[in-house]
Amino acid sequence: NVIILSLPTVPIFKEVIDDIEVNGKSNESKILIDMNTISLGDKIETKNKLEKLNINMVDAPVSGTGAQAKVKDIVVMSSGDKIIIDECEDIFKSFSKQNIYVGEFGNGIKFKILANLLVTVHNTVTAEALLLGQKVGLEEKMIYEVLNAGAATSVMLDKRMPLMINKNYEPATASMRIFLKDIDVITDYLKSNNLSSPTFEAAANLYNQSKENIPITYDTAAIYEQLKTNNE
């Protein structure tokens, strides 16, 4: 009676929801846990559709990479009906280290957008620090070890700088295909709230440039390659 959706693109998400609608109203109440990074508007529209089918939708995106998910090192940011979410606690515990209830429906995707905004910037500036260190003659392993030990570190530096150093972009811990979609979601959300975000916008511009040069199956650590190309 519980469905979990985690899909790579918005069109695929909408196609699945259309298929659920075709099947009609369920005789017994069901729960749909939506873990997708899509717009708040799409979330609310889908919730309203599913309510008519006797399906309760939970907005529960996660923070963490695919590699982290394999070892249950991700955090669920669940939002919606607290009673229903409590019923799903064992499910969340089965694949995450923590479920944080963040309030009313839609707050989950809001927090996911904040998290991915930071990830976009952290990933890009990790590439910048590595490239500068290489340019001035520092040894790559030491760049990673020193920066990761101090206050300048981040999860993205910890997880992605080794991938950049070793050019280990496949299999992806988070693919360029999915992350480019996420960047569009963040960009649209900033615009809808009349907010500029100069650091994110600069990083997003680099990702958009990468569409012409970086395979979409590559890990987002490959943004280092685009930065390197821009500096040649």
Image (tube, helix red, strand yellow):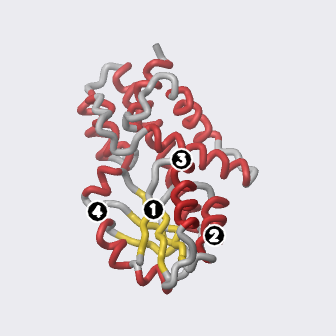
Say which residue appears at 54% left-offset and 73% top-offset. Answer: 57
Image quadrant assignment for residue 221: top left
Q: Disc 3 or disc 1, which is closer to the eye?
A: 1
Q: Position of residue 59 (x, y in %)?
A: 53, 68
The residue identified by callout 1 is: 5
Q: Residue furthest front?
A: 23
- Which amino acid does the dot numbered 2 rest on? Lys
N-terminal label among 2 and 4: 2
Dot 4 alpha-carbon crowd within 10 angstroms: few under 14, some 14 to 19, many 20 or more: some
* Quarter the N terminus occupies: bottom left
N-terminal label among 1 and 2: 1
The residue identified by callout 2 is: 49
Q: Disc 2 or disc 3, which is closer to the eye?
A: 2
Q: What whole-number distance in Å separates the C-alpha atoms at marks 2 and 4? A: 32 Å
Say which residue appears at 58% left-offset and 68% top-offset. Answer: 107
The residue identified by callout 3 is: 182
Where is 182 relative to 95, above or below? above
Q: Position of residue 5 (x, y in %)?
A: 45, 62
- Which amino acid does the dot numbered 3 rest on? Asp
Q: What whole-number distance in Å separates the C-alpha atoms at marks 2 and 3? A: 23 Å
Whether residue 103 is visible, yes or no, is no
> In terms of secondary structure, where does tag 4 sit?
loop
The residue identified by callout 4 is: 72
